């Protein structure tokens, strides 16, 4: 179990750095990352990571070298791993020299480690799970969503602790389905989930790729699998976010969406240690998408529903747009905005946060027009939105629904 886990993590590390082969340095980095909670390993993690430089440009699945296999064969317990790390990293030689032989890539890495400190590029500190969770908690609304995401990350962290102790893990699926209407924060939360997976150790990287049907499906037989595989390769290690994923569900026998889904299912299995998918869309349509392939149904086990924002929450979102733009809001502006939101939320195809952004942008445009109307512009005129600037003009919100046919005489 431990060897298999470290082998998968070493493969992911080699792929993430664009290296064509899994070498002892990748195994030791995976081991150091896995057991980083131990004091004797914590100090060695930085050295293990620096041994992976420089990055390569290989895109194929890395091959495991005999030296790496030999090292993995000797790692049957946490104590074996710690002993190997201490021996190979604390003693001085590079991980590859200790295992025997150096390749051209390893020689470059050794030169990079030997370079003067003044030439080194400062590395930003890795963000912690707590930091990303705090950012998630800072989002407006989404109380139930935050609770579910925190629960998922708690399982990931518990599994990490069990692995360090040499215990088996309770399998937790990293693939998620986000359901809900547009503008409810699904993309924003998906980005945070990618970073959380990396910070908690569930994935070896926090790459994030957004894709739709057009990014995955080609127009000719055989091309869709290649196109989808390219998107997967670009994403690893990290999370692929597919918005309106239900559009992939085949509607007829020659629909290439089925080929894209089959390719994604294979990637979910082949790269489970470095790749996760978050699929998003309306609830009913997403049920059809997941049910279109048995592989999807067995892998998507966690569904998170994103509710509509309340008028009060939309008002806070409106205020946040103004704050980010250094715009002051006149007394009464937020009450006027909330009044617009209360009328808008009942309408069909309401855009939630997107609607709040549109209202802010229209209000800004009215403020600007008012400022230049007299030919003289002052700074106060272009930094303050007035109550009179809050007005939404769109059919279906302030006016009745459009009718089709002849008007009554």
Image (spheres, grey):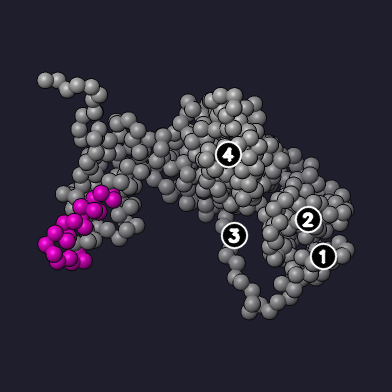
Residue, disc 1 = 103
Disc 3 versus disc 1: nearer the observer: 1
Q: Residue at x 59, y 52 (%)?
A: 206
Report the residue marked by disc 2.
21
Contact, CB < 8 Å: mark 4 with mark 1? Answer: no
The local crowd at label 1, few if under 14, some if 14 to 19, many if 20 or more residues have their Cα within 10 Å, is: few
Residue 218's mark?
4
User: Residue 354 location, x and y as percent?
Assistant: 36, 43
What kind of element bears circle 3?
A: loop
Q: Which residue reaches farthest front?
A: 220
Separation (CA) of disc 4 from disc 1 = 39 Å
Query: Distance from label 2 to label 4 (Cα)?
Result: 31 Å
| Disc nearer the start of the sequence (3/4) | 3
Q: What is the quadrant of residue 329 in the picture?
A: bottom left
The image's mark for residue 93 is none
Viewer-proximal residue among 57 and 185: 57
Q: Is residue 248 above or below residue 65?
A: above
Magenta region: 360-380
């Amino acid at each position: 179990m431990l060897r298999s886990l470290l082998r998968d993590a070493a493969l992911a590390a080699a792929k993430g750095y664009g290296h064509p082969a899994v070498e002892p340095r990748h195994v030791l980095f995976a081991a150091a990352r896995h057991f980083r909670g131990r004091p004797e390993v914590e100090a060695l993690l930085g050295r293990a990571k620096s041994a992976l430089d420089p990055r390569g440009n290989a895109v194929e699945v890395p091959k495991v070298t005999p030296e790496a296999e030999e090292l993995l064969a000797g790692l049957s317990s946490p104590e074996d791993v710690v002993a190997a790390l201490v021996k190979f990293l604390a003693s001085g030689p590079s991980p590859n020299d200790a295992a025997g032989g150096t390749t051209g890539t390893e020689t470059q890495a050794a030169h990079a480690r030997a370079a003067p400190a003044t030439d080194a590029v400062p590395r930003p500190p890795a963000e912690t799970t707590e930091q990303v969770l705090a950012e998630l908690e800072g989002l407006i609304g989404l109380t139930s969503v935050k609770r579910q995401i925190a629960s998922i990350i708690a399982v990931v962290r518990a599994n990490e602790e069990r692995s360090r102790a040499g215990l088996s893990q309770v399998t937790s699926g990293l693939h998620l389905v986000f359901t809900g209407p547009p503008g409810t924060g699904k993309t924003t939360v998906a980005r945070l989930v990618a970073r959380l997976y990396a910070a908690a150790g569930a994935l070896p990287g926090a790459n994030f790729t957004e894709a739709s049907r057009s990014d995955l499906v080609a127009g000719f037989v055989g091309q869709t699998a290649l196109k989808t595989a390219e998107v997967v390769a670009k994403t690893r290690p990290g999370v692929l976010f597919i918005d309106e994923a239900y559009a992939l569900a085949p509607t007829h026998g020659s629909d290439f969406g089925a080929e894209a889904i089959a390719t994604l299912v294979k990637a979910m299995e082949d790269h489970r240690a470095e790749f996760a998918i978050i699929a998003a869309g309306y609830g009913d349509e997403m049920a059809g998408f997941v049910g279109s392939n048995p592989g999807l149904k067995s892998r998507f086990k966690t569904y998170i529903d994103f509710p509509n924002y309340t008028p009060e929450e939309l008002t806070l979102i409106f205020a946040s747009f103004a704050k980010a733009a250094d715009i002051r809001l006149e007394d009464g502006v937020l009450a006027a905005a909330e009044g617009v939101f209360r009328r808008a939320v009942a309408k069909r195809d309401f855009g939630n946060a997107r609607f709040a952004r549109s209202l802010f942008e229209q209000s800004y445009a009215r403020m600007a027009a008012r400022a230049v109307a007299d030919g003289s512009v002052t700074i106060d005129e272009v930094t303050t939105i007035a109550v009179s600037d809050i007005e939404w003009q769109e059919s279906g919100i302030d006016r009745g629904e459009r009718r089709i046919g002849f008007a009554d005489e």
